[in-house]
Image: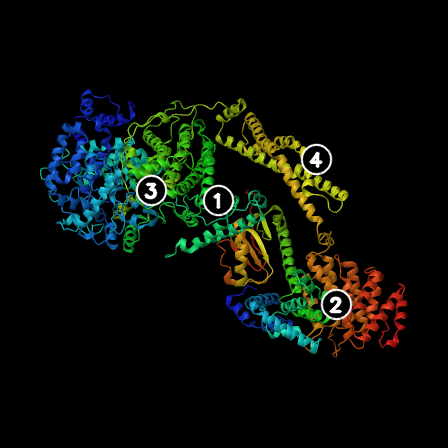
Amino acid sequence: MILTKAQYEEIAQCLVSVPPTRQSLRKLKQRFPSQSQATLLSIFSQEYQKHIKRTHAKHHTSEAIESYYQRYLNGVVKNGAAPVLLDLANEVDYAPSLMARLILERFLQEHEETAPSKSVINSMLRDPSQIPDGVLANQVYQCIVNDCCYGPLVDCIKHAIGHEHEVLLRDLLLEKNLSFLDEDQLRAKGYDKTPDFILQVPVAVEGHIIHWIESKASFGDECSHHAYLHDQFWSYWNRFGPGLVIYWYGFIQELDCNRERGILLKACFPTNIVTLCHSLA
Amino acid sequence: MAAVLESLLREEVSVAAVVRWIARSTRGSEVTALTRPQDNPGEAAALSSLRPLRKEFVPFLLNFLREQSSRVLPQGPPTPAKAPGASAALPGRPGGPSRGSRGARSQLFPPTEAASTAAEAPLARRGGRRRGPGPARERGGRGLEEGVSGENLPGAGGRRLRGSGSPSRPSLTLSDPPNLSNLEEFPPVGSVPPGPAGRTKPSRRINPTPVSEERSLSKPKTCFTSPPISCVPSSQPSALDTSPWGLGLPPGCGSLQEEREMLRKERSKQLQQSPTPTCPTPELGSPLPSRAGSLPDEPADPARVSSRQRLELVALVYSSCIAENLVPNLFLELFFVFQLLTARRMVTAKDSDPELSPGVLDSLESPLFQSIHDCVFFAVQVLECHFQVLSNLDKGTLKLLAENERLLCFSPALQGRLRAAYEGSVAKVSLAMPPSAQAVSFQPETDNRANFSSDRAFHTFKKQRDVFYEVLREWEDHHEEPGWDFEKGLGSRIRAMMGQLSAACSHSHFVRLFQKQLLQMCQSPGGAGGTVLGEAPDVLSMLGADKLGRLWRLQERLMAPQSSGGPCPPPTFPGCQGFFRDFILSASSFQFNQHLMDSLSLKIRELNGLALPQHEPSDEDGESDVDWQGERRQFAVVLLSLRLLAKFLGFVAFLPYRGPEPPPTGELQDSILALRSQVPPVLDVRTLLQRGLQARRAVLTVPWLVEFLSFADHVVPLLDYYRDIFILLLRLHRSLVLSQESEGKMCFLNKLLLLAVLGWLFQIPTVPEDLFFLEEGPSDAFEVDTVAPEHGLDAAPVVDQQLLYTCCPYIGELRKLLALWVSGSSGRSGGFMRKITPTTTTGLGAQPSQTSQGLQARLAQAFFHNQPPSLRRTVEFVAERIGSNCVKHIKATLVADLVRQAESLLQEQLVTQGEEGGDPAQLLEILCSQLCPHGAQALALGREFCQRKSPGAVRALLPEETPAAVLSSAENIAVGLATEKACAWLSANITALIRREVKAAVSRTLRAQGPEPAARGERRGCSRACEHHAPLPSHLISEIKDVLSLAVGPRDPDEGVSPEHLEQLLGQLGQTLRCRQFLCPPAEQHLAKCSVELASLLVADQIPILGPPAQYRLERGQARRLLHMLLSLWKEDFQGPVPLQLLLSPRNVGLLADTRPREWDLLLFLLRELVEKGLMGRMEIEACLGSLHQAQWPGDFAEELATLSNLFLAEPPLPEPQLRACELVQPNRGTVLAQS
């Protein structure tokens, strides 16, 4: 699961302008049968998000929104049962869930007196039954269940995956008899930055001292790793010393270059953990 | 002065008398080690006439030696040892056109005229003979000295100079060897054109050593290479040989600046004139100073020493001056002597006096060193007198010394002693490599939100910490890259970060971080961080000697600046320290600097006052040896920390006053002095020094004070406050006579350390030379008393060679010199040397006994007095920890209990007062008034805790063999101290602590009263037998999402799910919900919602089924089975709420509208089951159905819906068989009701 940069780029190359649908995913899996599905999905998702970040602005001009809305209206007038919104999103190369949000906002602006609040929109996206227009509700729902990179369901899945791996890690730590403080305990003590786990007694992994462990249920690509380094890992180092990051879905080998500096990358729970010996006899 | 020397050489007076004579000027009747015999009245008489010149003698002697050595060692190592005052003391010939000043100078000492005639005559003769008469010649010659100082630097020095492309150099050759060729010699004041200042206020000139060029090339040292008077003519590429920055003035002479100014002008004139070619002598003017390889080293032979007796006499006087600390820098003199010892060749002056013959004793006319043999002989003579110092050098130096063949040849006895000393030495000095940066750890006690004034400040600081380390990491990565510039690379980021520090409290947080990081990185065991010796690893010391020559030549060829700063390097910021200095400079934040100074001062006070265990001479056995290891380590850590902190404090404190411009003069200076004397010192170092001296802790206080003062600006030493400090330091310096060792006095290595750091300080350009000429300064500050009530830190062997060399890496230059000798190459380091100061000393007083402590405390002190220091340390440690633990324990027990009480009281309040609960502040007051009185228990509990815990800890930490009585006393003291500590804290803080904790609890509880109580509901875990093998929730959500997306479409014709898959999925969902190990509330919520969506799709028959022969509809029975499974999951397994009402949302019911023919039976079945299982109430369903009617439906669908509604409402809740019958009631509507 640890890919070289070249391997990673080969995969990323195949993901250019691919819509985030389950069909795309299926094709990807066929193309790279040797890679784990979770890794592929993670890479796909991250690549797609990078793509959306780059193009996000152009879909949010008022002209673009107006034109999308008109096309939506025309489409549903012709056939409300057809996947109008989903097709529109795929056609203009935008995430279906985000397109749904865009149209929903525009729709509510037109039908409500005041501009809809963000929480109202989020709530409607989570439960499209609340959308006053039945056709739009169905269209939005369709977008959400067909989007494998954005939307409340995907968010929930990602959150769940993250949580599950933290639990997994906790179990492994308990199993190894390593005592730790978890994020909640750290927060309660008033720590300003909290890795998933701080070991109460440091250990050594492959010759490197580990004070903390961060679990990342995603693939470590350059972009996300650098963001994590900046926002999290170095911050942990700045407070707690060297530590370990587990990218459960793998990472680009070349990124594991800060070992000497105090950030070790692994794609699984380390097997050879050296602990402090208490008995010197 | 010369007269004295002359008399000495003629044996008119004895060495002892001379030394007594010199020392008396400062020491009164104290008898020194070398002057035991009584004064001969005749001698006394001879010397008494010279009385006013006494303090001039040492400068004269040193300069005389330097000059003499330069005659015979023109290309010897660059003796950075030109001592001050030489020319001042050398009687010049009055009236010579170029000697106006000299003449004036000689007028300074009218009473000596008679006595000095003898010396003057020959010197004048010599001068007449050797020096071309006439001002131009004279000036040219003088001017050359600067060039020559470079030119004459042996080997690399000279060559590099040319490499650096100084255009005027090559032509600066000498016409006449003796004095002018001296690289160390500086334009004497005599060359200054006669002027009012020069005439009327002749100053005692102090000749600073020429700064070697390598130093000038190295940027951080500019403070040393650029003379304070900024006398470097602009035409000069660098400040490399700006010799005269050290012009001394006798006290009271106000014209220093004028004179300097004049000198500056004169020098630039000379520089312009100097290209005038003079006849170069091949030996001296040779552009390529011969080095190893070009000429063989001249062997030294004891049998060929020319004037043994004379050399012996001078060596003895010289040694005595060194021993009496009459010279400013002990190690500088040793360096000079080592240079003599390792001199390569003698260059014969071409007009060497033919009448000179060995054994001429009676005048100074003949050169002192007429051959290499003389030099070596003299050096060995001096070294013999200083065996004690030598034997305390590091093992590497000892080895090189013991292996020196010249030394063996000239003094086998000394060599034997050195060899023995080497063999017995354990003083290995290691160059530890710096550890990589470690971050300062986050400590909730000081760093969490409670320590900040606002959320914003807290989060700002959070970001700052990260930016700080980011900058640090970047620096680590790049600072060694050529072309990388701190300010360019990081400056703007640092300032942006500092700009965010708005709140004062944030500044203090940041400063704490900064300071801790500084200590952590720079005060590593290796010492300075980076390498200890100089800025680059001292490869010379690390490589074998035979490789040194090659390495040296290679280094030359690369023309890299020499890394080490010679025996007197300027203060620098080696290694990581550079980062912190540059950070301060780049940040250029007044607030930051102020907070930093506050914090540094505080820490310095704290560390300086640290009770370091004191040595007891009585317990010198094996055990105390082990203890002393620890003592020394602890002392070293404290001392190195102090030095680091003081260095930065000095740097920041004097930063606003330091600049490249020359120091102010005249009225401007007066006004600046008036202004500056109003400014209180950043840290009351004078008091700290006084106390340190009184408490006999000079060995701790002085080294850091020296670091602090080394950054002082030019004005500082002129301020009364700091002048007092310098006077104290000078007296201390004089008092540290190494040969005087006695019980209770300062240890040898402690003295050596102080002599080294003080000697170094005295060479710093900003320290004016004239300070050392203060004869009898105010002495009240020092005269406390002579009775030392107890042994102070000074008497404890806290300094070892490692610490000595870490603090004074320049001592390592000695070793380098010897190593270079072995390698067959000559050294070329320089260093500034100057200043000779005869000072007075009075005995170091000890402080009066402390009286204010209670009897118990004194008894405890007495108890420790006769115990090994480790006992005291253990007890103090235990007391400190137990006391601290006690407080923590009270927090965790008593306070936590009170908080729990507060919570339940609050709950009651909330119940009685209803939802609103009242004003939180008021609630808090009520609670606190009820609970705080309980804090009184804390003291009793604390006492009990300390009583219970301390003895065990003491017992565990002390040796098993500790006598029972000692043990129990130690235990009791530990209990007492711990209790005292804990109770002091508790009584002061317990109420505030309870208040704070209760307040936090109240706001927590009130928040919990707020929204989302559902999320906080109790959750069941999985059963004990569960092995957590259930599928992961994320996987299930993902799978169900896939089914939903298939059902909703669009989909390919070949896409679908099998009924088995659906069943399996629901089975897995059950497992997951029952395991719960990996389930988090949001996941469960989504699973619940997805399951409802799935049910709706089942009811509407919208799930595309993949099956054998393309069967696209789910069989009724299968659908029911799946719905049953779902119902059971909802009923049994979901722990959070399931949004079942979504089943009747218009959108989900609307799914039915799309199916043809419509089938309502599953919906009806589902509704009934919901009611049956108690998942939904009838009323609830009715309400949902009712609201469904309000939606807009196609006509027929609305009708069917109404029928269903009626049907459901009409039905009494009945068991299943009857349900089936009901279903049969409606066949006519075209709805096929499946028969189950």
Hey, which residue is sitting farthest left in the picture?
B355
Name which residue type carries label 2.
Leu
Relative image position of residue B43 (x, y in whole percent): 19, 23
Decide: few, some or many residues near mark 3? Use Cα within 10 Å; few <14, some 14-19, many ≥20: many
Percent position (x, y) of residue B85?
Answer: 23, 36
Q: Is residue B384 depicted above or below B533 in this figure? A: above
The total number of labels drawn is: 4
Query: Helix or strand or loop: what does disc 2 sit on?
Result: helix
The quadrant of the image that shows the N terminus of chain B is: top left
Rendered view: B1171 above or below B1047: above
Q: Nearer the viewer, mark 2 or mark 3?
A: 2
Q: Are marks 2 and 3 in contact (CB under 8 Å)?
A: no
Q: Which comes sooner in the sequence, label 3 or label 1? A: 1
The answer for how far apart the CA atoms under marks 4 and 3 are is: 67 Å
Callouts 3 and 1 on one subunit: yes
Q: Quadrant of residue A38?
A: bottom right
At label 4, which amino acid type do we have? Gln
